[in-house]
Amino acid sequence: MRIDKDLVAASATPLVLGILSDGDLYGYAILKRVSELSGGGMQWTDGMLYPLLHRLERLGYVSSSWGTSDAGRRRKHYAITQAGRDELADRQKQWTVVADALRQVWQATQRPQAVVEGWA
């Protein structure tokens, strides 16, 4: 299934902040986690993730630091900041409202037409 790019863009910030709220990660690990969480339905690329991480860092929602992997490679690790946690909480509230509204719309479309039109 292909997920519309507008939906991917709208969900990217809360998804990355939510992933980082579980602990610091480097870019490839974030990409892998997005794929895992979506059951493989979302396959982000470096070209999508790194500009987002840089923007979140400029906004003060994430911080970064260089570290070394077990294999000796240098990797940039990203961590959520308190401002990022505050933003994540706000985004969670927004997405709850949107998800509830969509759920109601979708439930209404599954009812027989007479019930939807108020004839039941």
Image (cartoon, grey):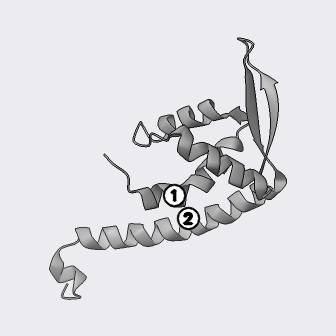
Residue displayed at 21% across by 81% down: 115
In the image, residue 65 sits, relative to residue 109, either above or below, namely above
- The crowd level at tag 2 (other Cα within 10 Å; few <14, some 14-19, many 20+) is some
- Precedes in sequence: disc 2 or disc 1: 1
Q: Quadrant of the C terminus?
A: bottom left
Horizontal arrangement in the rendering, residue 59 relative to residue 40 (left or right): right
Nearer-the-camera pick, 74 or 118: 74
Nearer-the-camera pick, 50 or 90: 50
Query: Which residue type does callout 1 highlight?
Result: Ala
User: Regarding mark 2 in the picture, which secondary structure is present there?
Assistant: helix
Query: Which residue type does callout 2 highlight?
Result: Trp
Residue 9 got which mark?
A: 1
Residue displayed at 56% across by 38% down: 46
Name the residue beneath numbered marker 2. Answer: 95
Q: Position of residue 101 (x, y in %)?
A: 45, 73
User: Regarding mark 1 in the picture, which secondary structure is present there?
Assistant: helix
Q: Are marks 2 and 1 in contact (CB under 8 Å)?
A: no
In the image, residue 115 sits, relative to residue 89, either above or below, namely below
Horizontal arrangement in the rendering, residue 40 relative to residue 96 (left or right): left
- The crowd level at tag 1 (other Cα within 10 Å; few <14, some 14-19, many 20+) is few
Camera-nearest label, 2 or 1 = 1
In the image, residue 115 sits, relative to residue 78, either above or below, namely below
